[in-house]
Amino acid sequence: MVSYKYTFKMLLLGDGAVGKTSLVQRFIHGKFQSGYLMTIGMEPYSFFADIGDTKVCLQLWDIAGQDRFASMRQIFFKGSLGALVTYDITRRQSFDNLKTWINEARSESPRIMLMLAGNKIDLDDLRDVSTEEGAKFAKDNGMIGFIETSAKRGDNVPDAFLSMGEAILRSIEKKIA
């Protein structure tokens, strides 16, 4: 049995097919599956990590991004401390829809910490959203950070999840001190 000090519930949010499931699968299992598998409702995962000298459990909730699941999503926000809000760098529409995801997250969980992830940088030749646009969007919307990832190659995937965990831990420790 793994012993840990904290459990951090973190959501993966964003439009369908931006790579949320692929990101979490790469992070948890170190694998990439090329076929698209739509998440139905929500899929939970757990990952135990050492952040500094603190052992934590990252509860990762992969939330379905399709509109037909919108009415049920709100129940998944309860108790969430952070969210990785994800878009596909090759699909402008997924970037344009980020405000909707941010508004939903902050409406359902006002103190949630949000980090922006632009996924699919392995498809840079098809890029439709610049790195600068992503960074500016994250800053302008009060997000705790911005990162670009590739679930296919594994680029920056651990950093996306672990830096969110670090930010949550710092926030908790600041409140305790």
Image: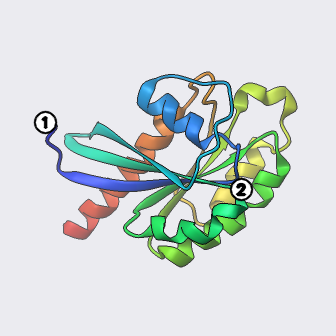
| Colouring style | rainbow
| Residue at image point 48% right, 76% down | 110
Q: Quadrant of residue 17?
A: top right
Q: In this view of the protein, which residue sits in the foreground, 76 or 95?
A: 76
Q: In this view of the protein, which residue sits in the foreground, 31 or 132?
A: 31
Q: In this figure, which residue is indicated by the disc labeled 2?
A: 136
Q: Are marks 2 and 1 in contact (CB under 8 Å)?
A: no
Q: Is residue 175 left or right of residue 21?
A: left
Tell me residue 102's x, y (percent): 62, 67
Q: Quadrant of residue 79?
A: bottom left
| Residue at image point 80% right, 43% down | 130
- The residues bearing labels 2 and 1 have C-alpha atoms spaced at a distance of 43 Å
Q: Secondary structure at mark 1?
A: loop
Q: Secondary structure at mark 2?
A: helix
User: What's the amino acid at mark 2?
Assistant: Lys
Mark closest to the chain's N terminus, 2 or 1? 1
Q: In this figure, which residue is indicated by the disc labeled 1?
A: 1
| Mark 2 burial class by Cα count in 10 Å: few <14, some 14-19, many 20+ | few
| Residue at image point 64% right, 37% down | 37
Relative to residue 107, is residue 8 depicted above or below?
A: above
Q: Is residue 81 left or right of residue 62?
A: left
Relative to residue 99, is residue 163 depicted above or below?
A: above
Q: Is residue 1 left or right of residue 129?
A: left
Relative to residue 105, is residue 63 depicted above or below?
A: above
Relative to residue 122, is residue 108 depicted above or below?
A: below
Tell me residue 107's x, y (percent): 55, 78
User: What's the amino acid at mark 1?
Assistant: Met
Can see residue 141?
no
Can see residue 176?
yes
| Mark 1 burial class by Cα count in 10 Å: few <14, some 14-19, many 20+ | few
